[in-house]
Image (cartoon, rainbow, N blue to C red):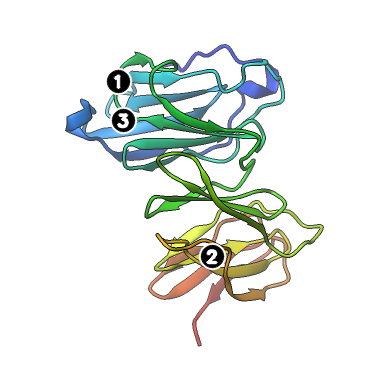
Amino acid sequence: HDRMLDAPEEAAQSYSTPLVFAGNADWDEPTEMLIVLGADHVTAHDAADGREIWRVGGLNPEGDKFFRSIASPVVAGEFVIAPYARGKTVTAIRRGGSGDVTASHIAWKREPLGTDVPTPAIRDGRVMICGDKGLMSCLDLKTGQTLWEDSLPKNRNRYSSSPIIVDDHVLLTREDGHSWCLAWPGEKGDALKILGEGTVDEMTVATPVCLDGEIFLRTHDSLWCIQPE
């Protein structure tokens, strides 16, 4: 199926990763769903055949021609969270429905707030967003309300790596290879808490991967395997 959408110039380009997840029969979803963010829209598809189930537009109401998308959408419970507008908006969309659900299924929208490159991390009803300059925002998943906002240490380097959740921690890497281990903000988490940090001193824009107690980090020139002491 062609995903033909009318988006101006660079706004038609998307570098975000499509998201595949198990559908929910209670919302009349197929066995597997596919969510695509780009070209000023979020679209939901049947992963088996590509058939479009619903779409949400209006992510670029002014028709800005430079709104290409990089950060990927995230699914958590009944919501699809879509960062857009080069880090200026975050939109929560309720799952379910069919056709154009722009008017009926947007649960909340925050602006100016968001992330251009790092994909948000979500768990326990909390949405953690890392801005490109290290501004950390923790939102309530259901309402979009800001629970707290704080900044990582100032630096000329930006953030392209996405925060990842590991047990009760969040790992996050800056473009110069400096990484932080943060406490995950659970139900009582009301502030940014840095538990530890370290560096490989190499440029990286990739997101780390954790497997069997080890951290794998791809930099510009190397692949690192970091083991706990």
Residue 35 or 218: which is nearer the viewer?
35
Gap between marks 3 and 2, in whole Å? 30 Å
Residue farthest right in this picture: 156
The earlier-in-sequence mark between 3 and 1 is 3
Crowd around label 1: few <14 · some 14–19 · many ≥20 (10 Å) = some
Label 2 crowd (10 A; few <14 / some 14-19 / many >=20)? many
Report whether 86 appears left or right of 35: right
Horizontal side of residue 136 vs 25, given as left or right: right
- For residue 228, above or below residue 188: below
In the rendered image, which quarter is residue 104 located in? Answer: top left
> As shown in the figure, which amino acid type bears the numbered disc 1?
Gly
- Spot occupied by residue 123 in the image (x, y as percentages of width and height): 39, 54
Task: Tell me what residue is drawn at x 72 percent, y 25 percent.
Answer: 66
Callout 3 secondary element: loop
Q: Position of residue 112 (x, y in %)?
A: 66, 35
Image coords of residue 88 (percent x, y): 65, 35
- Residue position for label 2: 171
Is the residue 50 above or below the residue 144 in the image? above
Label 3, label 1: how far apart the Cα atoms are: 16 Å
> Label 1 belongs to which residue?
97
Return the mark for residue 47.
Answer: 3
Discs 3, 2 touching: Cβ within 8 Å:
no
Mark 3 vs mark 2: which is more N-terminal? 3
Front one among 142 and 162: 142
Residue 222 falls left or right of residue 126: right
On the image, the x and y values in percent for residue 62 come to 67, 16
> Residue at 54% of width from left, 57% of height from top?
163
Which comes sooner in the sequence, label 2 or label 1? 1
